[in-house]
Amino acid sequence: MKVAEAVGRALAAAGVDHVFGVVGSGNFHLTNALVAAGARFVAARHEGGAATMADAYARMSGKVAALSVHQGCGLTNALTGIGEAAKSRTPLLVLAAETTETTSNFSVDQDALAHSVGAVSTRVTSAEDAVEQACGAVHRALHERRTVLLNLPLEIQALDAPEGAPVSPPPERPPVEPESDAVAELVQTLERAERPVFVAGRGARTPHGRDALTALAERHGALLATSAVARGLFHDNPWSIDVSGGFSSPLTAELVRGADVIVGWGCALNMWTMRHGRLIGPEATVVQVDDDPAALGRHRTVHLGITGDVERTARRALEASGGQRPGYRNPTVREAIATRVRWRDVSYADESSHERIDPRTLSIALDDLLPAERVIGVDSGNFMGYPSMFLSVPDHNSLCFTQAFQSIGLGLSTAIGAALARPDRLPVAALGDGGALMSAVELDTVRRLGLPMVVVVYNDDAYGAEVHHFRSGEFPLDTVVFPPTDIAAIARGYGFEAVTVRTLADLEPVRDWAAGPRSTPLLIDAKVTAEHGSWWLEEAFKGH
């Protein structure tokens, strides 16, 4: 058995059950070994798409996923997706063939490439140690929540591998127990609070974490919010105020800004979630709970930082708490939440015409037409707030939000990876026309995999974020505005059903598709209004 085969078999035994990629000569044998050992290989049409599919699959499945790429150019093609995964601390294993011949055209500094986007890099250095080093990379990805590049030199892949001990998956990452003094201080802070708000982030996205936070919030009368990546965690809770930050509805922003205690649970409290700090009242006490001590206070000053697992910390605080307190919870607040916290309940002047549909009107109609059990992948751009906030989600496994790198073109691959992780749900990809055309090659992957996906393109014939950011009249916009493109026709060429939508009446085929067998994916080319930027855009560009 050669090293390439031994490593592939070991990775499958270590728990890697899905590998995404584009196969070239350098990763051919390794990828085939993974498949022979039981892993599913998902062939993308571009390494950048493969990287984001793997990222999304890992996020939504809770498992370490793998990306397999050719040496040199295969890795460089994947870098944007790897950067997104690294910045989001996704447990992802990048398997890259490597040439050590400096005269080869494939020769690049692969370690430097990984480090430049925030990933960590390691290497198989000998036939004797190859399996151990590969399994160590899986362990590191899982336990450090890192994107790990495993370089596999070609000459070592081709060596004979010694027989080794059986491989088993690494144990789960052990939860971090908070210090009792820190828990006591948290409880004292909550018992003094009159208007506490909990903001749960990526680190709270588990059923046990949700249940512990819900119980602690009930005890102290806290309102429940999330960051965008954890949207849906408190779905159907009457005290949930949805997403805190740039996507917040007016009521949500008002309630968070009115809090006298804000506790971030596995949440970075960054500029997006706290609107550059403007959602934090001048007298508010800020607490942050995270199992990574380096995360505490990274984005803003906190009055109390607690190193600990979200669920463990919330459970310990609940055990140490006294009797139930009303806190922020009263009939007036509950009624306001029930009637005004959702964006679709906020009145607006419909700007639709016979030629273009208001993205709010479109999104509300799609929310009603499409099955509630859905998983949504969202691309980046001016449009992104509409599907992120107007399409409802049943739980925290319903929105895959690959936005840490703020790159357009990732949304379609995000939806593919999420769909494979959640095959029980209708996958929905929400894209702008720029991102749709940038990633159109992966429409082939959707069709080839037989995914019953809905791809919604919010088409304003422009890079809308730049149009609205620079629309002062001072600069020409020719570089960011394009002639109309029939994206529906492009989708039909890939084997999709497709419909062009300008008015609500044009959505009738969507209703028929949703009620039918969904044996063919559907693309909706929605010609949306473009008179002004979305509500969150001005907030977003304050960080630029």
Image (cartoon, rainbow, N blue to C red):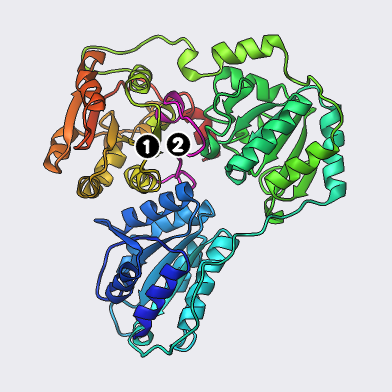
Name the amino acid, label 1.
Arg
Tell me, yes or no, whether the two marked residues, 2 and 1, touch with CB atoms within 8 Å. Answer: yes
In the rendered structure, which segment of residues is drawn in magenta? 387-408
Name the amino acid, label 2.
Ser
Mark in front: 2 vs 1: 1
Q: Callout 2: 10 Å neighbours few (<14), some, many (20+)?
A: many
The residue carrying mark 1 is 425
Q: Is 403 part of what is drawn in magenta?
A: yes
> In this rendering, does residue 109 appear at all?
no
Q: Callout 1: 10 Å neighbours few (<14), some, many (20+)?
A: many
Query: 261 or 482, which lies in front?
Result: 261
The residue carrying mark 2 is 398
- Of callouts 2 and 1, which one flags the residue occurring earlier in the amino acid sequence? 2
Q: Residue at x 28, y 35 (%)?
A: 455
Q: Position of residue 158 (x, y in %)?
A: 32, 86
Q: Quadrant of the N terminus?
A: bottom left
Q: Residue at x 41, y 51 (%)?
A: 57
